Structures are given as C-alpha cells and as structure tokens.
Amino acid sequence: MHTIRQIINDDNKFRQILRGLNSTFYHKTVNSNDIEEYISKESGIDFSKVFDQYLRTIQIPVLEYKLNTRSVSYRWSNCIEGFDMKVKVKLYREQQEWIQPSQNWKTLNLSNYDGKTFTADRNFYIQTKKVE
C-alpha cells in the first residue's frame, strides 16, 4: 500500500480511499478484484498492472538505467508485460523527478545533469541496476 500511496502522491486522497474502503465494503465479503477496482476507480489511476506485478508474481521489478552527460535512460525489466509503474528518483542536488518507465528504453534529457547520480526512492519495492 505504501507504493500506491507514493504514486497517488496526495495524502488526503489516499486517506479518503482508505476510509471509503471501510464504508463501501463494511460487513461485506470482498475479493482482491473488488479492492483493486475500488482503489483504481477512486484514485483515477489504473493500478491493474501494479497489482498484477506485486500480487500475482514473485518477480521484483528491476529499474535498469544508463547515465550519460545531460541525460539518463531507463526501463523496467523482470516484470510482467505492460508494467509501467511510475517511480520517484533523485538525479542531482537533491532534485527528485517522477519518471514512468516501461519495458522500452526512455530518455530524460537534463541540461544541468552531471551524469553521476541516479537513485530510486527507497519506498518503492524495486531493484535498480546500472547498465553500461
């Protein structure tokens, strides 16, 4: 749930979702699909691939990255088809950016980037791997 809270990036909305789960499903028998659909609907974010990745596989997603002067390239590996969860990374001088990797390489061009720092937020249950 912490990863979902991070992605929603709005504590009030996340709190409303948790309270809504209680009121909507109070004294009801529910399954995983009921909860997953509710969270996606109320957040306005499709979490289906995130739930599939974390609830239905044992694979830990790997955020692969390449550092270049003034750019960083990144992608997901060791994940289900279509997994594209966004993640917060620190690039330089404490600057944090949200990126949304997919299984294909993406590049973020940065004018003041030193090409040395790339750290994923430790609150995401992922691994990182530098690729040459």
Image: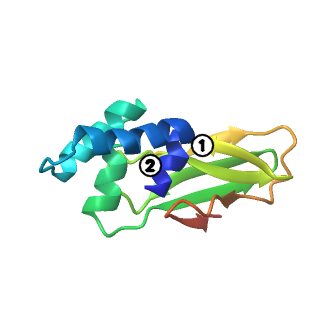
Q: Which residue is mark 2?
A: 103
Q: Are marks 2 and 1 in contact (CB under 8 Å)?
A: no
Q: Residue at x 37, y 50 (%)?
A: 50
Q: Observer-nearest residue: 86 or 39?
A: 39
Q: Observer-nearest residue: 3 or 106?
A: 3
Q: Which residue is mark 1?
A: 99
Q: Residue at x 47, y 41 (%)?
A: 14
Q: Quadrant of the C terminus?
A: bottom right
Residue 57's spot in the image, x, y percent?
28, 64
Q: Quadrant of the N terminus?
A: bottom left
Work out whether 54 lies above or below 112.
below
Work out whether 16 lies above or below 124.
above
Instruction: Single out the residue that lies furthest toward the left.
Output: 29
Mark 2 → mark 1, Cα distance in angstroms: 13 Å
Amino acid of disc 1: Ile
Q: Secondary structure at mark 1?
A: strand
**Is disc 2 surrounded by few (<14), some (14 to 19) or many (20+) residues within 10 Å?**
some
Nearest to the eye among marks 2 and 1: give it.
1
Q: Residue at x 58, y 65 (%)?
A: 128
